[in-house]
Amino acid sequence: MTSSSGVRAERPRRPGGRAAAVVARVRQATAELLDEVGYEALLLPEVAARAGVNKTTVYRRWPTKARLVAELMLAQIAEQDPGRDTGSLVGDLIAMLEDIARLLRERTTRAVLAVLVGGELDETARAARDAFWAERFQRGAAIVERAVARGELPAHTDARLLLEDAASPVYFRLAVTGRAVGRADLELFARRAAARAQLGGL
């Protein structure tokens, strides 16, 4: 069906059913291949073959691998729980950093992040990338809101700056330099970021 503007409008799809099963298989195949061969060697026909679907089905919904991988990352974050409430700002930050470190140790996550950070993305994939980071920060903002409510942080604290301050060393080590990150490191990063924010520096 084509609209008056000439843009083809897709028919509404019922939730679940065959379409949802196909999407799930394609996402699983993409994650497996990313883990096995990395992003550069990822090919959409191989994704289709691994998923057991026709390659035209893949190309119709995901015309580029950048778009497919970006959507995969959005699906992954949608399945994650919001920041855990440990009862303290430092505890919440440590829990968040533990989750980030765990994800970054997975080759699939690192491959997807490489695409979102430096890949050649089309407009739709860039929108997915922006939505991914917006969702990450929105979920993390709950940590700051709880800390403000507990009186641990000033009301004017910039949640995004605090989260970036705490998480940046983890991303830099695990995704850029490949250096190990242990529990003591995560505690240091969390306490340092919390202290700066409590002093009104963020």
Image: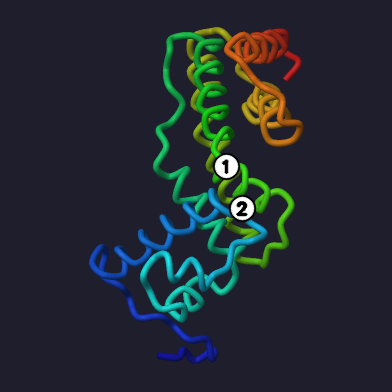
Find residue 34 and report its horizontal and vertical position in percent: 55, 53
| Mark 1 neighbour class, 10 Å CA radius: few under 14, some 14 to 19, many 20 or more | some
> Does residue 86 appear to the left or right of 124 in the view shown?
left
Residue at the image point whose x is 43% and y is 12% from the top: 86
109 or 117, which is in the foreground? Answer: 109
Q: Quadrant of residue 106?
A: top right
Residue, x 72% and y 12% (percent of image)? 196
Give the labeled residue for mark 1: 107
Give the mark, 1 or 2, whose residue is nearer the N terminus.
Answer: 2
Callout 2: SS: loop
**What amino acid is labelled 2 in the image?**
Gly
Location of residue 139 with respect to 92 vertically, above or below: below
Q: CA distance from mark 1 to mark 2?
A: 8 Å
Q: Are marks 1 and 2 in contact (CB under 8 Å)?
A: yes
Going by the numbered disc 1, the residue's amino acid type is: Arg
Q: Residue at x 25, y 63 (%)?
A: 16
Mark 2 lies on residue = 38
Left or right, 120 with reference to 56: right
Q: Which mark is residue 130?
A: none
The image quadrant of residue 82 is top left
